[in-house]
Amino acid sequence: MDAARLRRLHPAALRGELALAGSLVGLAVLAWAISEGRMDGMDMGPGSDLGGFGFYLVTWVVMMAAMMFPSVLPMVSIYRRLVGDKEGHRGATSFLVAGYLAFWAAAGVVAYGLFELGKALASDALAWDNAGQPIAVGVLVVAGVYELTPLKSACLRRCRGPLSFFTESWRGGRGGAVVMGLEHGAWCVGCCWALMAALFALGVMSLTWMALVAALAAVEKLLPWRRLATGSVTVLLLALALGVAASPADVPGLTVPSGDMGGMDHDAMEMSR
């Protein structure tokens, strides 16, 4: 690994950087379009049914590509500059991204298990008119407070400093790229798990809340002023918690569950199976 590569950006390398950026953004746009299609007909409110496991897992991975690819671009770009055309590293960038997505997929499986376990144990107690609303408020408060914790700061530091991450965790070859992708994915999950929990609280099948959470993650990772970014996200999450607690019907974009469709219409439920 040679950090001097980061200072040498010849025209051919610049074209490669632009192609890489275009590829990631293009994949993110495609993922957004696929997400919209897969979520069509599903309830977009808090506690919405996730569908069958296979349907959910594919949807989750596509969602993570849509939400995270733009903000992970600096990490992927620096890796590509570091490896260049070194022997054994050609095409390794895709392995890095695959490892990153794989860890997010694993996190999604855990989220699915917890969600389904909660439904099995609590049944109707989690309905919006019972404990659903207070739980949604509590999740948003926890997400807001987590922004201020040392663990959040430590994870975010790795996400915002990909060069330092590679310096500390470098492994060569395609296998090493997968391992580093997994490791960076772990730091990213540590940084953003509370934001994803907030997404579940607001409506995990809503493109509106997907876009908001993706924007918040990008602000935290890309905005030069880290404390301003995390402080702003904290304020927004706590404001949402207050709105959901006091007057959920007036929260823009929030679909308040009516309790008469079980989270998904019949046709969408059949498709998810």
Image (cartoon, rainbow, N blue to C red):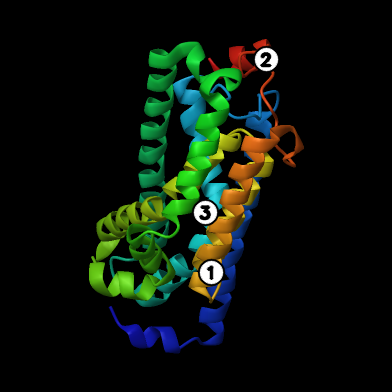
Q: Is residue 44 above or below residue 160?
A: above
Pointer 1 local density, CA inside 10 Å: few below 14, some 14–19, many at least 20? some
Q: CA distance from mark 3 to mark 1?
A: 12 Å
Residue 153: name its quadrant: bottom left
| Outermost residue to the front | 246
Q: Circle 1 — which element?
A: helix
The percent position of residue 45, horizontal first and vertical second, equals 64, 29
Q: Is residue 84 above or below residue 147?
A: below
Residue 136: name its quadrant: top right
Q: Residue at x 42, y 73 (%)?
A: 78
Q: Is residue 1 left or right of residue 145?
A: left
The answer to whether residue 27 of the structure is visible from this angle is no
Instruction: Identify which residue, 149 or 162, lies in the foreground.
Output: 149
Labels 3 and 1: the sequence-earlier one: 3
**Amino acid under label 1?**
Leu
Instruction: Identify which residue, 74 or 238, lies in the foreground.
Output: 238
Query: What label sits on residue 222 in the rendered view?
Result: 1
Q: CA distance from mark 2 to mark 3?
A: 29 Å
Q: Circle 3 — which element?
A: helix
Q: Which residue is mark 2?
A: 265
Q: Circle 2 — which element?
A: loop
The percent position of residue 223, horizontal first and vertical second, equals 56, 71
The percent position of residue 12, horizontal first and vertical second, equals 54, 81
Q: Is residue 245 left or right of residue 131?
A: right
Kindly report which numbered mark, 3 or 1, lies closer to the viewer in this rendering: 1
Q: Which residue is mark 3?
A: 68
Q: Is residue 41 left or right of residue 146?
A: right
Labels 2 and 1: the sequence-earlier one: 1
- Mark 2 and mark 3 in contact? Answer it, CB < 8 Å: no
**Amino acid under label 2?**
Asp
- Mark 2 and mark 1 in contact? Answer it, CB < 8 Å: no
The answer to whether residue 244 of the structure is visible from this angle is yes
